Amino acid sequence: MSIHVALKNPGEKLVHIDVDFENNTISFIHISGDFFIYPEEAIEDIEQALLSLPVDPNIIEQNLLTLIQKNTIEMVGISVSTIVQGIQEAFAQS
């Protein structure tokens, strides 16, 4: 069963993260909320890039930053740090 975390950091929109872990790696993740990501299908690319990553904030952040830069993804109302924070909060509850 996935763990649900809801976050709203200053200057950002509400973010919901549902995530499962297996052997200290991300085995499932779904990110939703009031934010915008362009192109819209990039949210699926972000979720896919997070699968099988170890729950290490530095590795998660670097992978996301590389993906966003490589694919010219624009994020409005959400940040990489919020995604990392949500995953860490969920992992602490697992």
Image (cartoon, helix red, strand yellow):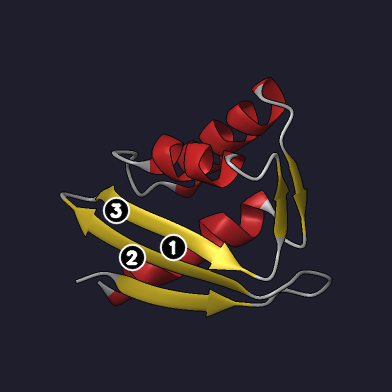
The quadrant in which residue 88 appears is bottom left
For the point 62% across and 61% down, which residue is it?
Answer: 82
Closer to viewer: mark 3 or mark 2: 3
SS at badge 1: helix
Indicate which disc, 3 or 2, sits on the residue closer to the N terminus: 3
User: On the image, numbered disc 1 is attached to which residue?
Assistant: 88
User: On the image, numbered disc 2 is attached to which residue?
Assistant: 91
On screen, residue 38 above or below 33: above
For the point 64% across and 34% down, which residue is it?
Answer: 65
Q: Residue furthest left?
A: 23
| Real-space Cα separation, disc 3 to disc 2, in angstroms | 12 Å
Is residue 16 found left or right of 71 in the rendered image? left
Question: For the C terminus, which image quadrant?
Answer: bottom left
Who is closer to the viewer here, 13 or 80? Answer: 13
Kind of residue at badge 1? Gln
Indicate which disc, 1 or 3, sits on the residue closer to the N terminus: 3
User: Residue 85: where, in percent of width, then height?
Assistant: 54, 63
Closer to viewer: mark 1 or mark 3: 3
Kind of residue at badge 2? Phe
User: Residue 58: where, in percent of width, then height?
Assistant: 51, 41
- The reply to whether the C-beta atoms of the residues labelled 1 and 2 are less than 8 Å apart is yes
User: On the image, numbered disc 3 is attached to which residue?
Assistant: 28
User: Residue 36: where, in percent of width, then height?
Assistant: 72, 57
